[in-house]
Amino acid sequence: MIGSIEVNYGVKSDADCADRKKPAKVSDGNSLHTSMKGWIQRICDRREWCRLPKPNRRMFVDNNSQDNFLQITYDCEIRPAEWHSIVACENQTAEIKCEKGEVKIVNARFGRFDENTCTKTPSKMTFCTSFKAADRVKDKCSGTPVCYVTATPDNLGSPVGCDSHPKYLSVDYECEEND
């Protein structure tokens, strides 16, 4: 799964694409929008894989051109065996429960992160997310043996960057036993 993430940007004309193992030259400036790293982390953090949009003008404060690129560097980690996962399609309710102990939310996302989950028609918008979902699920579920979360924008915050395809809630959690 994807661990720590670093986001930089540069200009394609400064990159040597023939040497794929060598990091591209990135800019020292602050033209990348301040929310980009957090947005990318919300989409990709602790996921097996993620897909991001091509760079566009909203990602940059200035120096926006067709020649810009994003360079994302990340570590791969092994997913802990004790994690549980649950997915609830939009308007469905997820039951998050522990047979023993209490729920500890590892991560929670509401939006769209792949092409096919909860839809019969594949979506190309796999980078849409609510910035409030993780905190809302943690507030509701952490420290309880069971909780129920309905996958709606009212409960989890409205995802941004979406198309009209249904969204879904994805939760990874573990059960902590109290001593």
Image (cartoon, rainbow, N blue to C red):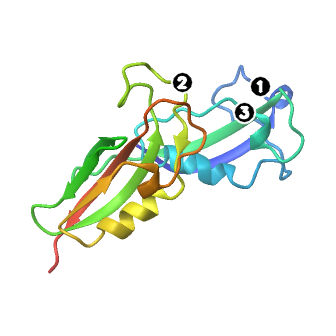
Q: Which residue is mark 1?
A: 16
Residue at the farthest right position? 63
Residue appearing at x 63%, y 31% in the figure: 53
Residue appearing at x 69%, y 24% in the figure: 19
Q: Amino acid at mark 2?
A: Lys
Vertical order, 77 against 24 (above or below): below
Residue at the farthest left position? 99
Q: Are marks 3 and 2 in contact (CB under 8 Å)?
A: no
Vertical order, 106 against 91 (above or below): below
Vertical order, 18 against 140 (above or below): above
Vertical order, 33 against 148 (above or below): above
Work out how far the residue at label 1 is from the one at label 3, CA to CA, in angstroms.
Answer: 18 Å
Q: Which residue is mark 2?
A: 124
Q: Which residue is mark 3?
A: 55
Q: Nearer the viewer, mark 2 or mark 1?
A: 2
Mark 1 neighbour class, 10 Å CA radius: few under 14, some 14 to 19, many 20 or more: few
Mark 3 neighbour class, 10 Å CA radius: few under 14, some 14 to 19, many 20 or more: some
Q: Nearer the viewer, mark 3 or mark 2?
A: 2
Work out how far the residue at label 2 is from the one at label 1, CA to CA, in angstroms.
Answer: 29 Å
Q: Position of residue 115 (x, y in %)?
A: 44, 26
For this view, does 18 lie left or right of residue 135?
Answer: right
Q: Amino acid at mark 1?
A: Asp
Q: Are marks 1 and 3 in contact (CB under 8 Å)?
A: no
For this view, does 70 lie left or right of residue 144?
Answer: right
First-in-chain label (3 vs 2) = 3
For this view, does 105 lie left or right of residue 177?
Answer: right
Camera-nearest residue between 82 and 110: 110
For this view, does 11 lie left or right of residue 82?
Answer: right
